[in-house]
Image: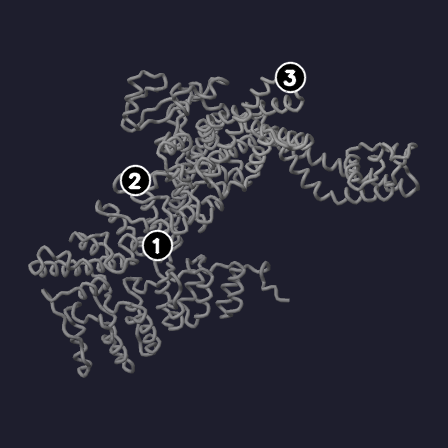
Amino acid sequence: MDLNNCGFIDPQAQLSAALAKQDIRQFKAALDCGAQADLQDDRGTSIFEKALSTPGCRDFIEACLDHGSQVNHINQKLNKAAVNYAADSRDPGNLAALLSPRPGQKVQVDRKYAQLTPLNSLAKNLTEENAPAVLTCMKLLLGYGASPNTVDQSEFTPLHHVLRKSKVKAEKQEFVQLFLAQPELDIDSYRKGEVRRLLQAQYPELTLPEERQTGPEIDIQTLQRTLRDGDEELFEQQFTEYLQSHKDAHKDNQLNTHQEEFFSLLQESIKKGRQRAFEAILTTGIDINSRPGSPNEANLVETSVIFGNWQALERLLKEPSLRLSKDSKLLNAVIGRLEQQPYDGFNHQRCFDLLVDSDRVDINEADSGRLVPLSYAVLNRNTMAMKKLLNNGAYIGSKSAFGTLPIQDMPPEVLEEQFDSCITTNGEKPGERNFEIIIDYKNLMRQERDSGAGKPSAPSNQLHDEMAPIAFIADSKEFRHLLQHPLISSFLFLKWHRLSVIFYCNFLLYSLFTASIIAHTLLKYHESDLRALTVVFGILSWLGIGYLIIRECTQWIMSPVRYFWSITNIMEVALIILSICTCMESNFDKETKRVLAVLTILLVAMEFCLLVGSLPVLSISTHMLMLREVSGTFVKSFALYSIFVLTFSLCFYILFGKAEVSAEGGEGDGDFNTFSKPIEALIKTIVMLTGEFDAGDIKFTSVYTYLIFLLFVIFMTIVLFNLLNGLAVSDTQAIKAQAELNGAICRTNVLSRYEQVLTGHGRAGFLMGNHLLRSICQRLINIYPNYLSLRQITVLPNDGSKVLIPMSDDFELKTLKGNNQASFQQLPMSPNVPQKKLLDPPVKLLPCCCSVLTGKCSQMDGRTVKLALAVIDKKKSMEQSRKQEQIKDGRLKIIEHRLEQVLQLLQDRN
């Protein structure tokens, strides 16, 4: 049995042994078992590097690449790239395996090691013995795009090295012909044209390229060749001469004439990392926003991001004339390349940091699938990128085209750590009266960005659903505990502060409707003599029905497709229909009228119970949640066990279903207890399940009837009923154990439902085309930017937990000061510290809807304040621990240094 040695032998040791024995099967098996080809040993060399530098290891190299090794792998200690290792092996197979086409990966074939490119290294180490292999390797490199003109530290080109090999006789001319076949070959620019003289002396019969001219004959092709060769000093000289030679010919039209040519030079300088050349071309005033080629061609900024040229990107982002298009998606493009290792000044991580920190780049930019950079970071499982984006204000509620949120697959600890970082202070001592807790909602509110004209980029009628991420957190078991975080609880406090006026108005109107229709129904169907009172309650009931119709029609218009997906909406439609049938004078018979009245009262009571359960009172919401959970558990459990209930009801109907005849010749009065009808037998069995047997009325005719009845009592009444009671108790205890969390869940569900109705589930209907209605909805719904202009609040824990809102509108500040309103909080004037005011009611013309009950409308609840202080203390403790660790590390380094000095002294004495 082949266990592939997984679990019994160290896969890393197996990988090394397989390479030494040239056993490709064991080599692949070790990789499949988790061995890492890029893991360095004690000598700083990895298995991948050994395979690259060992001849005959083509299959091993391909296996490493298939298991995650990079074609541009770099040994950080030696600064040596994979292509340099492959060139040192002088094995065409190794080099071909590395250069084989792979999606999204291109080998940097001109990367230098010890001042030598792979082509230079091959030419410098050419001998008579390795000539055939070296010739094949050179063909592969030149065919892949290697430059034949790159020089080493002594200004020798690869062809120059070949011509200097006097001991190589057999295939030397093939090398020369290979280089002469390259259209970009330069045999005149280096070492004063020595290559041309050697060619003329050794191979006078060969046709050589035309001698390169200097001065005014420099063209774009010459500049491109020099740029590819990497001689930036020569490029600057040639570029200056080129500009001078064309200055008089084109005058003012010079830049327009050479726009496309200079753009291609800029693209090449970015790809090759030629920063001096890049700066020289930019000084011409070229339009950096142009796309001279096809519209789909990458512009300069996109090219810098794709290749990881952070220096060019940093320079471009500083250009005042830079205009980034909406289709650039720079952050999305760079996040997928963050795993690539940096090399020769190319660093995608630096590009990512520059883009995130730049105010020119929208951190919430979305692609065609509405995926934002945070979504890409989560998909790539890049925790560092997640933290960086969140720390810079990435919105966690951006929905993709499939309705998913960026945080759906995010580790909960990452989100919790970010929430902790959003709780800060003003730096005062915790005991001071002016000590402030600053809560930043940058990740919970979509930041409004301005277009070039200073207008919002989003449509003017767009209403954002700010509760979407909170609703997802409440529905997710992994994230649900975050609802008790002070950032979320304070956000729910603000949302409830804004939407409570709608809730309480609806609660008041529906309460009046409930009282009216119940009173009207009782007076009407009992034919009371109070006719005037009956008419008054009837009118109030019709007004309530009219209110319900308007309310439900508004919800339907806002979201017609999703309206009937809610059971609550269906129940409300049924309530309206039954209420109309109850209040109107119909031709139904009395029994039908009474049934309709009963159903109306039941639905009215259920709706009122649900509405009361939505009140922001912890005990009420907890009991309502208990009722809902226990009811759901019972229904699901009883749906399964109903098979046994139906079975026993049929058994009782067969055994005890004989109808008793009374003395008068009619049927007896105990039909219900005698199981004479199947429906009555089923109902009687369900009643017996609760313990109501009435066994004295059951006629037992044989021992079998006793056994069936006893089996029912033991299995159904004792076992099943107690099982259902146990499930109910278990649910109740679980809900009580996390009552505060459940209260937050209930409040989240209420606020989310109200916001979805008012925003049309993120797609406002035609009603929102009206400016007045849209302004009212924005005032009541969206906290940012209509209410919190800076996306943060301040809490004063030592001053009654007052909530202050930062003000950025100078006109509003002057108005508040001029009216001497008590809601204005005068703070020290500072250009960096905005003025703040107390939290005001959602409708300024009315007092706060909560002030009648508590008188604390502008105060944060005490539990949230305590949790915020706990978060601050935890962060302070972690910071102190980190500093202590740094001190310990510093001391350990000093001790190591002193020990090294002692050892050195001992060695010197010996």
According to the image, label 2 marks what residue? 450
Measuring from the top left, give residue 277's x and y in whole percent.
20, 56
**Label 2 crowd (10 A; few <14 / some 14-19 / many >=20):** few
Using the image, determine if residue 467 lies above or below residue 371. above
Q: What is the quadrant of the N terminus in the image?
A: bottom right
Q: How far apart, in angstroms, are the residues tagged by discs 2 and 1? A: 35 Å
Measuring from the top left, give residue 776's x and y in whole percent.
39, 30
Measuring from the top left, give residue 719's x and y in whole percent.
78, 38
692 or 893: nearer the eye?
A: 692
According to the image, label 1 marks what residue? 342
Compared across the picture, whether 202 is left or right of 80 comes to left
Which of the two discs, 3 and 1, labels the residue nearer the N terminus? 1
Number of numbered markers: 3
According to the image, label 3 marks what residue? 529
Using the image, determine if residue 200 lies above or below residue 239. below
Q: How far apart, in angstroms, are the residues tagged by discs 3 and 1? A: 92 Å
Residue 438 numbered tag:
none
Which of the two discs, 2 and 3, labels the residue nearer the N terminus? 2
512 or 236: nearer the eye?
A: 512
The type of residue carrying mark 2 is: Asp
- The quarter of the picture where residue 421 lies is top left
Measuring from the top left, give residue 353's x and y in whole percent.
34, 46
- The reply to whether discs 2 and 1 touch (Cβ–Cβ < 8 Å) is no
2 or 3: mark nearer the eye: 3
The type of residue carrying mark 3 is: Asp
